[in-house]
Image: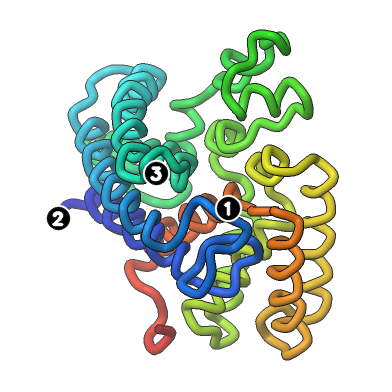
Amino acid sequence: MNSSEQLSKYLSQAILLEVAAAPKPGLVTRHSNGAHRDMSLLTFAMSSAVAASAFFASGRIGSAHGGSLPELFQALRRYGREAEKELLQSTQGVNTQRGILFAGCLLAGAAGYLEQEGQALTVRNVCRTVAAMTEGLVDRELKSLKQEAAVTAGEKLYVRHHITGIRGEAEKGFPSVMSHGLPGLRDAFKNGATLNDACVHALLALMTVAEDSNVVWRTDYESLLWLRERAEQVFSLGSIYTGKGYEAIRELDHDCIERRISPGGCADLLSVTLALYLLENKEFPTKVM
């Protein structure tokens, strides 16, 4: 298995780890359907197989690409639209992992491109390549939109609230992951956390900053601000490291379910975080699972 295929494998592992980790406020876990009535762990099992196959295919597209990075983005976008149809077919129309399908295919494609160019496959290089690939994406697809022309959830949210969602994260090289997701995960491992708790801690770190379009789409913009404030409160109580912090996470989960809040965008960024951590370190610390 070459280096770019390794990242596709890490992405495939990451999406499984993300959905299994618990407690995750409002999200599907191995214990709960969270704030969702239309999906469960079984739905994610169906879509994860499709997403994993798409990651490897995207890596091959990147490896075979001989043009510019914007042209690579268009090639990945064309493939991604077909993969998205297969993903939705596998879940009978339920949107489980479209965000991470988009982000993961870009990351895998970037890795394939870097490898065939003979460049080092580092976290920073991969993220910079995704940023170069998607440069101008928000301007092209969102900034010129009029309200009546907005069709997708992402387009409508930009028109209403200027939320750029996963497009904005990709175009900027996943800043939430670099500044909060990865540092949160590293901190958790440094302090002896299990893999499950490290995932929860990194997710909460992402929730304090990420522009989660899924939260706003399901509820409203005020709910996003509320969620960020509650995540900050969890950190002030010690997060996963203290009894009070852990109880606050459980309370936040309960409240998110009551309010129908599901930070699916943060969940996608957690998957990116886990995959990039593995790219950087090859494995998780021993005895964390």
Q: CA distance from mark 2 to mark 3?
A: 18 Å
Q: Residues within 10 Å of mark 3 (few under 14, many from 20)?
A: many
Give residue 256's position: percent from left, percent from top: 72, 61
Residue occupied by mark 2: 1
Using the image, determine if residue 216 lies above or below residue 41: above
From the viewer's perspective, tell me whether residue 193 is left or right of residue 212: left
Q: Earlier in the sequence, mark 3 or mark 1?
A: 3
Q: Secondary structure at mark 2?
A: loop
Mark 1 or 2 closer to N-term? 2
Q: Mark on residue 177? A: 1
> Residue at the location (60% across, 66% down)?
202
Residue under label 3 = 104
- The kind of secondary structure element at disc 3 is helix
Quarter holding residue 107: top left
* Number of other residues with Cα within 10 Å of mark 2, as a class: few under 14, some 14 to 19, many 20 or more: few
Q: Determine which quarter of the picture holds residue 139.
A: top right
Q: Judge whether residue 144 can be spotted in this image.
A: no
Which residue is depicted at the point 81% across and 80% down?
237
Q: Amino acid at mark 3?
A: Gly
Q: Quadrant of the C terminus?
A: bottom left
